[in-house]
């Protein structure tokens, strides 16, 4: 409380993420008010953490009265209708210049709608991605706000106070106009899906394909985490693979976990958004598909019994080949994700700065990695003659191009050996197929065009007259 008795900021929704975010704000010296529909939960949280000195309101009306003006309210409620419901309730209570931030994993098109709604209202709206899980929310997340710029300037000091810090700086930046913050968070999650899938595939190859004991798999990830692959997800993989099964002495927990992956939707949204923006993201799409197939456990069990495919030992692949395949696929996946951000920024007028987005992902978030500092540097290069700064595609930046070239032989050996021995590597192989398609100046689509023209008179362009669309009466063998 200050001399006027008012709080500087409110958090609405004090679940795991909201509660920890409120405590994080408080730990930076901010006076924080909190509200949660289940009021007893809010009071219990405040009582459990007296050091945060959270002031709990029993209604949104009371909460609004606790705040200095212009008010700043951060919503940490479930994405979807709950956000609209809170906005409906806050709308008559808010005044000129007040700021409402949606910090959930909202679908960006919902954020577009809310941004449009706020334009006719006296209050301002910010859609903001937050990554780092519950621990990140408490100790320093990566924060991706977008939308109203005036509101961002007012939010900047408290957000900079709570965000993660990495050697590249404080992990919050203005991501762009409109729904940019939530779009950026969605792509972050899509990339997260890709990384997780690639790591899972390499783990399965080591274990099932090459017969390594779990200890060797864990040690290899721990070793990789000291090199170019250093990242949160590699680090936690080594930890996970060493965790004992509390219900089965001597066994490892990983062996007791059912192979059915959940998903809340952000990966699927990324794939849909990519298709809508005309950007191929096959690594991320493969990761979403793999989760869907994983969920069909009973079907997979029946299919294995019915079809009994031969599954053998992986031959001719070294540990370095596996690392190279993982790293090269990661470059492919991040190239796709950043290409989507670039295309969406142009189509949707976000004005996003890709170097800044890479920078705020260097710390705090689930995909944090030393690799992202290299991506930041690539996008921070001198302006191109036309279009945005940096390389046209990440993989075309000179050091990433050289990296992929060096890893290509190992990448091919891994994908080929996995296919030959019957081990599924959808993420690694989709990434390689993307690379091979990208780097083939004359591809196989001539035939697609011919077929389209044959059955539907859709026309095609000749190689000697691009831009001129012609139709052919194709000779038909059946007439
Ligand atoms: C983060 C995570 C976070 C959450 C995902 C999990 O950045 O902190 O991505 O947003 O863990 O929602 O998503 P799935 O349930 O879809 O795997």
Image: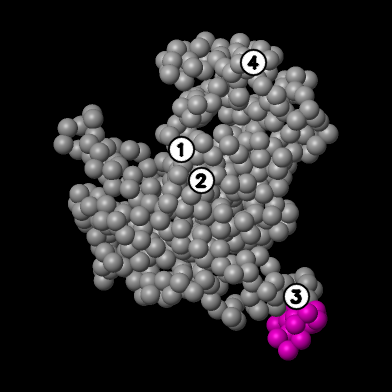
Earlier sequence position, callout 1 versus callout 3: 1
Dividing the picture into quadrants, the one containing residue 90 is top right
Q: Nearer the viewer, mark 4 or mark 3?
A: 4
Residue underneath mark 3? 453
Label 1 element class:
loop
Which residue is located at x 51 percent, y 53 percent?
359
Earlier sequence position, callout 2 versus callout 1: 1
- Marks 1/3 in contact by CB < 8 Å: the verdict is no
Give yes or no for residue 468 being in the magenta stretch.
Answer: yes
Label 4 element class:
loop
- Marks 3/2 in contact by CB < 8 Å: the verdict is no
Label 2 element class:
loop
Earlier sequence position, callout 4 versus callout 2: 4
**Neighbours of disc 4 within 10 Å: few (<14), some (14-19), many (20+):** few
Residue underneath mark 2? 171
Residue 436 position, x and y percent, is 50, 73
**Magenta residues (range):** 460-477
Q: Nearer the viewer, mark 4 or mark 2?
A: 4
- Marks 2/1 in contact by CB < 8 Å: the verdict is yes
Earlier sequence position, callout 1 versus callout 4: 4
Residue underneath mark 1? 140
Earlier sequence position, callout 3 versus callout 2: 2
Instruction: For residue 474, say whether it is visible.
Output: no
Mark-to-mark CA distance, 3 and 2: 51 Å
Q: Nearer the viewer, mark 1 or mark 4?
A: 4
- Marks 1/4 in contact by CB < 8 Å: the verdict is no
């Amino acid at each position: 409380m200050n001399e006027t008795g008012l709080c500087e900021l409110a958090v609405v929704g004090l679940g795991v993420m909201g509660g920890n975010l409120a405590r994080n704000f408080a730990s930076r010296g901010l006076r924080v008010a909190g509200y949660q529909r289940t009021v007893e939960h809010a009071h219990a949280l405040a009582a459990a953490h007296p050091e945060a000195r959270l002031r709990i309101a029993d209604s949104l009306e009371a909460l609004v009265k606790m705040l200095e003006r212009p008010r700043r309210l951060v919503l940490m409620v479930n994405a979807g209708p709950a956000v609209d419901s809170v906005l409906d309730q806050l709308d008559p209570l808010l005044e000129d210049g007040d700021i409402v931030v949606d910090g959930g994993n909202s679908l960006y098109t919902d954020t577009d709608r809310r941004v449009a709604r706020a334009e006719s209202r006296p209050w301002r709206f910010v859609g903001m991605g937050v990554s780092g899980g519950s621990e990140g929310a408490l100790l320093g997340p990566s924060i991706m706000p977008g939308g109203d710029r005036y509101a961002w300037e007012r939010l900047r000091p408290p957000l900079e106070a709570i965000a993660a810090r990495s050697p590249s700086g404080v992990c919050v930046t203005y991501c762009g106009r409109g729904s940019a913050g939530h779009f950026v968070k969605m792509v972050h999650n899509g990339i997260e899906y890709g990384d997780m899938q690639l790591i899972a595939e390499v783990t399965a190859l080591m274990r099932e394909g090459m017969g390594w004991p779990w200890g060797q798999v864990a040690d290899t990830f721990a070793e990789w985490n000291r090199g170019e692959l250093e990242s949160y997800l590699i680090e936690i993989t080594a930890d996970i693979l060493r965790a004992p099964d509390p219900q089965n002495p001597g066994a490892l927990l990983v062996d007791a976990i059912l192979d059915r992956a959940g998903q809340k939707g952000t990966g699927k949204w990324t794939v849909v958004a990519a298709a809508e923006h005309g950007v191929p993201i096959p690594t991320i799409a493969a990761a979403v598909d793999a989760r869907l197939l994983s969920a069909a456990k009973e079907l997979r069990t029946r299919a294995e019994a019915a079809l009994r495919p031969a599954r053998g030992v992986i031959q001719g692949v070294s540990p370095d080949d596996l690392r190279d395949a993982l790293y090269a696929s990661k470059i492919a996946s991040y190239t796709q994700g950043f290409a989507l951000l670039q295309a969406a920024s142009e189509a949707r007028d976000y004005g996003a700065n890709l170097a800044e987005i890479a920078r705020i992902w260097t710390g705090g978030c689930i995909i944090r990695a030393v690799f992202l500092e290299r991506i930041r540097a690539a996008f921070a290069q001198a302006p191109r003659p036309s279009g945005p700064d940096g390389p046209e595609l990440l993989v075309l930046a000179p050091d990433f191009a050289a990296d992929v070239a060096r890893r290509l032989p190992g990448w091919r050996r891994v994908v080929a050996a996995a296919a030959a021995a019957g081990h599924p590597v959808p993420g690694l192989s989709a990434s390689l197929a993307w690379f091979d398609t990208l780097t083939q100046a004359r591809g196989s689509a001539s035939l697609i065009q011919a077929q389209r023209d044959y059955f539907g008179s859709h026309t095609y362009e000749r190689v000697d007259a691009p831009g001129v669309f012609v139709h052919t009466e194709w000779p038909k063998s059946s007439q």
